[in-house]
Image: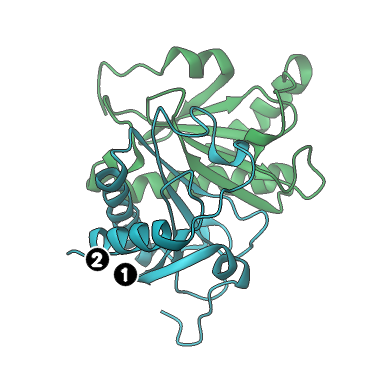
Chain colours: A green, B cyan
Amino acid sequence: MSASFNIHAQLLADCEQLGNLDLCSVLLMRDARFPWLILVPRIDGLRDLHDLPTTHREQAFTEVEIASKALHTYASADKINVAALGNMVPQLHIHVIGRREDDAGWPAPVWSAGPAITLEGAELKERASTLKTLVFAE
Amino acid sequence: MSASFNIHAQLLADCEQLGNLDLCSVLLMRDARFPWLILVPRIDGLRDLHDLPTTHREQAFTEVEIASKALHTYASADKINVAALGNMVPQLHIHVIGRREDDAGWPAPVWSAGPAITLEGAELKERASTLKTLVFAE
């Protein structure tokens, strides 16, 4: 991992930091509508998913699986959406989102579901604490 | 790969089949607005990305890279969007989309850019033929 690595300011503005897995920092999106984690590989200069060095790809996949299973347990998710888009924030980050057939955007992608409903206060604390326990349980 | 594997009917309705890499079938989305490939691992019963057996994950990543580089060459893409959503089509499929800062949806995700503009006729033939050559060049 890069010693000088910094998470992009926009991700820090939108998210709560939960902690670090071996490769990725784990962020919680402050959107009350969807249980939504973001994984940021701590390597400088990555943009597209395939920029991830081959030596780190298995670990990235493992960490997507950890985040997916945490969301599945937390939210009884029917489906996990995984995406590396990065049109607005160029630093490589991987969205891992738990979706339910009764959620605010189903079946459309979350990006088509309108603006975020800010997750804050007790609800933010509860979600951050529970997901932190689930993600870092092993 | 599963001998009995079938690509979901909705994907076949929306896409042109370009051929098979070692793990995934490669489809071209018939949307004139975006150069858009879809990779479908030929294993029965997968839904979420982490359902992919660990023994196939490196190959999946390699094939995402092949598709990404083909789109980069074909469309001088500024950014590659990679996503496994599957809220509508449950069979695991990975979107690999070349994005440009002057495209019809930038910087929003393609799913927020309104309905597809059907890719057909000579334009479809040209895109399918060129991307097929680029994806299967090696």
Q: Disc 1 and disc 2: Cα gap in Å? A: 8 Å
Q: Which disc, if any, is residue B132?
A: none
Secondary element type, mark 1: loop
Which residue carries the number 2 mark? B136
Residue beneath disc 1:
B21
Apparent side of residue A82 relative to residue A40 in the rendered image (left or right) = right
Using residue B101 as the reference point, say whether residue A104 is left or right of it: right
Q: Which corner quadrant holds the N terminus of chain B?
A: bottom left
The vertical placement of A126 against B60, above or below, is: above
Whole-percent x, y for residue A67 in the image: 54, 42
Please name the amino acid that badge 1 sits on.
Leu
Cβ–Cβ under 8 Å for marks 1 and 2: yes
Residue nearest the observer in this picture, A29 or B112: B112
Residue A44 left/right relative to A82: left
Chain letter of mark 1 equals B
- Tell me what residue is drawn at x 67 percent, y 32 percent: A130
Chain containing mark 2: B
